[in-house]
Image (cartoon, rainbow, N blue to C red):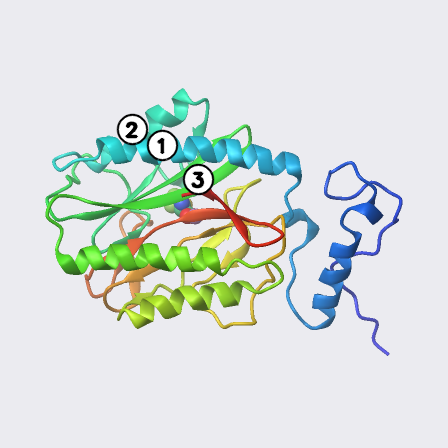
Amino acid sequence: MPILKFKTPKLDRNAPCWCGSGRKYKQCHEAFDEKLRHAEMMGHTVPAHALIKSPKDIEGIRESAKVNIAVLDAVADRIEIGMSTADIDRIVQEVTRNAGAIPATLGYDGYPKSVCTSVNDEVCHGIPDEKVILKDGDIVNVDASTILNGYFSDSSRMFCLGNVSEEKKRLVQVTKECVEIGIKHVVPWTFLGDMGDAVHQHALKNGYSVVRQIGGHGCGLAFHEDPWVSYVSTPGTEMMMVPGMVFTIEPMVNMGTDEIYQDEENGWTIYTKDGKPSAQWEVQVLVTEDGCEVITY
Ligand code: MF3
Ligand code: CO
């Protein structure tokens, strides 16, 4: 008989709980671990304890998120036609530093700037540049990530500049709805695949496609943690969502094909293959006992 080995260990019931609450294991996460083990027995993927945030971690992530939200609020106030994407980078720098925080992208894997600014057919990871001037009719994603006291937060918004065509406005709106639908489908003890499929179906229903190769991620104690989060997924698959997990919902929705390519020169920026526009909104959520708390927006 093979011995089945599960990720969720059996622990001393009277020892302090692994979650850092200070309570005894039997009064804290014991029943939770039983549920995890049961799910594992059924063949599901469950998070390791390292992905379950402690109350202290959650407080730290919320504080980081306040700065992250303030950064995007400042961009929302000041973004305008004629400004360069490097100007957006300066706003992000200023607001982040003034709050005693650090932009998480700066120097991340060699990324050179404090924010990503992706215009029109740029899907993500557009690099702020003095030469990229925002024009009437552009749609731009501004993706900011923040480190405060070692805690990470991440979110992005779309901005429509001047007279944006009805079809681009609709893409931006439907992508926002995709995220709202994703948030509604963060239900503890169901699967990331359920949530991802709900997002995907809303995009498909509106005639759009969703990028497959790039997704969301756990986020909080590090910039990019497990799990990887797809928005082209199958219900009942992928990691189970359980209370205490923190991850992003950030689908990239394309007006045309889901095919993409990477900028060969800068090694970062992703574009749609057909040159049609792409939109993205990103929020960070904490799975709770009865749904989720939206930490960044
Ligand atoms: N905020 C992006 C994300 O959601 C950051 C990508 S890494 C970068 O993961 F270096 F390109 F910024
Ligand atoms: Co992200």
On screen, 284 above or below 104?
A: below
Please give the residue where the numbered disc 1 appears in the rendered image: 71
Label 1 environment density (alpha carbons within 10 Å; few <14, some 14–19, many ≥20): many
Marks 1/2: CA–CA distance: 8 Å
Q: Are marks 3 and 2 in contact (CB under 8 Å)?
A: no
Instruction: First in sequence, mark 1 or 2: give its number.
Output: 1
Q: Return the mark for residue 91.
A: 2
State the residue in front, 96 or 159: 159
Indicate the position of residue 145 as horizontal and vertical percent values. Answer: 42, 38
Marks 3/2: CA–CA distance: 19 Å
Instruction: First in sequence, mark 3 or 1: give its number.
Output: 1
Check disc 1 and report its element: helix, strand or loop: helix
Label 3 environment density (alpha carbons within 10 Å; few <14, some 14–19, many ≥20): few
Q: Return the mark for residue 278.
A: none
Check disc 3 and report its element: helix, strand or loop: helix
Instruction: First in sequence, mark 3 or 2: give its number.
Output: 2
On screen, 184 above or below 59?
A: below
Quadrant containing the N terminus is bottom right
| Residue 263 shows up from this direction | no
Q: Are marks 1 and 2 in contact (CB under 8 Å)?
A: yes
Check disc 2 and report its element: helix, strand or loop: helix
Q: Is residue 112 toward the left or the right of residue 188 in the image?
A: left
Residue at 34% over, 58% down:
177
Q: Is residue 13 toward the left or the right of residue 166 in the image?
A: right
Q: Amino acid at mark 1?
A: Val
Does the beta carbon of the residue at mark 2 sit less than 8 Å from ligand 1? Answer: no
Q: Are marks 3 and 1 in contact (CB under 8 Å)?
A: no
Please give the residue where the numbered disc 3 appears in the rendered image: 108
On screen, 93 above or below 23?
A: above
| Residue 130 shows up from this direction | yes
Indicate the position of residue 297 as horizontal and vertical percent values. Answer: 40, 43
Label 2 environment density (alpha carbons within 10 Å; few <14, some 14–19, many ≥20): many
